[in-house]
């Protein structure tokens, strides 16, 4: 089928590449000229495994086209995914201006093309009721427009976006029209049946995957809320395990064993129980806040989620306290940060806990420096020092003369660093591991003073 995808961000681009991969013809719409030029050359503007290969293959096969002209894309297609951003707008919750603009453009197109029927699919994360409001917006502009507006939220994780799109746990479709809902389901048939072609170009399927993939067909308001509820629940798991980790530090227990011990209970499950400095990124912080704001706007205080957000923020502060308690003060201390992206496998630095901490430490007088395998360029755009270089391409150079290192992103390659050499280069061999990457006894064996999160005496400190 011919499909337009509006917005070539993480979600839009991964959707476009994956849909082209399973045989659809895609017209990706992007207004940013620099991004568009890269895409036309088959290059991904974001760091995401497999995308480059899938893009160039899709273009060569004639299944992927990119344009800045929405009308040109809609002219060709029967279906349009909206995948533009919904950032947070302070206390007002999700900022739907990009959604409204895209929907308005679609409406004007439909007004000029009264015979055209379009299925508009809301891929962007939007508050419950948005599809209803946006359908009204289309009708205001084009009262006779023929369209269905279907909610179809995305559950992909950055860093494994292609894998999550091709091998999802479920597909959620929200529509009041059974016909439209089934049409959207049909777009995913190859994914539902596990018939993914050319698996040398994309990730291999997981060993055990339940085919057919479950499809949840519901109304748009529920579908929209499923997305927010999923992210809120995962964020809750993280804050919960961080609270237990903080308690474990006090009692001298080990959070790794606790997470393993509770995760074996199938009702709890082992995932999202990694304690550390809390969640960041472009999704959990934004979506948890947007959900509490929406609840508040309906006169309901979402107490649990408010606490989840507070615990997450406190986790970053606790980690900084740990550092300052050991170093006495930040002023004049050289602190090296390992990691800049909000998690490994991505160059995304939006709401990265590490960058927030680095900014704070620098503000308190520390000489901060950092290394990340892929995110330096993006980090520089949001945090830099005019008078000195803080970003290093070589982690060993970065470690030179440091009073301590703070591990803030769990890039697997950090495990393979030459830690004995790093120890020699540092002024004081002190490590604060915000992601519990290492075995404490191993690091102590290498001669480091090693602090982590929630692992008994290794993590003990007395400030709050
Ligand atoms: C998240 C969800 O996992 C996706 O399902 C969802 O589609 C996406 O948001 C979205 O709404 O677009 P993502 O933000 O890419 O995906 O990253 P996650 O892998 O979920 O990690 C989020 C943060 O939680 C990271 O900072 C990570 O380090 C942290 N985390 C994760 C923990 O601190 N502990 C854990 O056990 C797991």
Image (cartoon, rainbow, N blue to C red):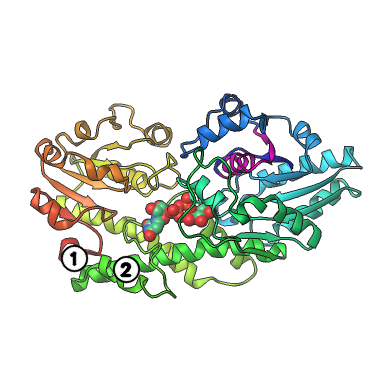
Relative image position of residue 453 (x, y in whole percent): 25, 60
Relative image position of residue 435 (x, y in whole percent): 29, 54
Q: Is residue 18 visible?
A: yes
**Please, is residue 363 above or below residue 444 in the view?**
above
Q: Residues within 10 Å of mark 2 (few under 14, many from 20)?
A: many
Q: Quadrant of residue 56?
A: top right
Q: Which residues are magenta?
A: 11-30
Q: Which residue is mark 1?
A: 462
**Please, is residue 298 above or below residue 211 in the view?**
below
Horizontally, is 298 left or right of 357 in the view? right
Report the mark closest to the observer, 1 or 2: 2
Residue 22 in magenta? Answer: yes
Q: Which mark is residue 215?
A: none
Label 1 vs 2, first from the N-terminus? 2
Q: Is residue 279 visible?
A: no
Q: Is mark 2 within 8 Å of ligand 1?
A: no
Please state the quadrant of the image where ligand 1 appears. bottom left
Q: Which mark is residue 259?
A: 2
Horizontally, is 145 left or right of 459 in the view? right
- Is 297 in front, or is 437? 437
Position of the C terminus by quadrant: bottom left
Point 33% across, 43% down: residue:
359
Residue 192 in magenta? Answer: no
Point 33% across, 59% down: residue:
315
Relative image position of residue 303 (x, y in whole percent): 49, 72
Horizontally, is 66 left or right of 246 in the view? right
Q: Quadrant of residue 73?
A: top right
- Is 296 in front, or is 222? 222
């Amino acid at each position: 089928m011919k499909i337009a995808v509006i917005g070539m961000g993480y979600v839009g681009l991964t959707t476009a590449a994956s849909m082209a991969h399973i045989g659809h013809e895609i017209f990706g719409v992007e207004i940013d000229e620099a991004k568009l030029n890269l895409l036309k050359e088959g290059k991904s503007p974001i760091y995401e495994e497999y995308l480059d290969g899938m893009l160039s293959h899709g273009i060569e096969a004639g299944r992927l086209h990119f344009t800045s002209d929405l009308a040109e894309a809609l002219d060709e297609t029967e279906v349009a995914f909206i995948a533009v951003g919904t950032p947070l707008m302070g206390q007002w919750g999700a900022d739907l201006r990009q959604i409204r603009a895209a929907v308005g453009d679609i409406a004007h197109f439909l007004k000029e093309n009264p015979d055209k029927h379009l299925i508009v699919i809301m891929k962007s994360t939007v508050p419950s009721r948005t599809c209803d409001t946006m359908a009204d917006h289309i009708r205001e502009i084009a009262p006779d427009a023929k369209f269905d507006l279907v909610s179809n939220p995305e559950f992909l994780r950055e860093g494994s976006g292609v894998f999550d799109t091709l091998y999802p746990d479920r597909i959620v479709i929200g529509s009041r029209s059974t016909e439209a809902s089934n049409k959207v389901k049909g777009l995913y048939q190859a994914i539902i049946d596990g018939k993914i072609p050319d698996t040398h170009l994309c990730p291999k399927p997981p060993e055990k995957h339940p085919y057919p993939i479950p499809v949840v067909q519901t109304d748009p308001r529920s579908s929209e809320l499923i997305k927010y509820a999923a992210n809120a629940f995962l964020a809750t798991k993280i804050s919960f395990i961080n609270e237990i980790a903080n308690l474990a530090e006090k009692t001298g227990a080990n959070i790794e064993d606790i997470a393993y011990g509770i995760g074996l209970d199938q009702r709890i499950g082992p995932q999202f129980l990694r304690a550390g400095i809390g969640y960041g990124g472009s999704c959990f912080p934004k979506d948890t806040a947007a959900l509490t704001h929406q609840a508040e706007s309906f006169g309901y205080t979402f107490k649990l989620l408010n606490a989840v957000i507070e615990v997450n923020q406190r986790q970053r502060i606790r980690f900084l306290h740990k550092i300052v308690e050991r170093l006495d003060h930040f002023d004049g201390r050289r602190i090296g940060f390992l990691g800049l992206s909000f998690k490994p496998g991505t160059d995304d630095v939006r709401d990265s806990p590490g960058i927030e901490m680095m900014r704070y430490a620098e503000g308190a007088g520390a000489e901060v420096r950092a290394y990340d395998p892929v995110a330096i360029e993006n980090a520089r755009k949001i945090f830099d020092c005019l008078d000195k270089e803080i970003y290093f391409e070589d982690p060993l150079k970065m470690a030179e003369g440091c009073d301590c290192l703070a591990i803030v992103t769990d890039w697997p390659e950090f495990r393979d660093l030459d830690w004995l050499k790093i120890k020699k280069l540092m002024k004081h061999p002190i490590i604060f591991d915000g992601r519990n990457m290492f075995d404490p006894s191993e690091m102590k064996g290498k001669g480091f003073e090693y602090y982590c999160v929630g692992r008994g005496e290794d993590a003990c400190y007395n400030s709050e």
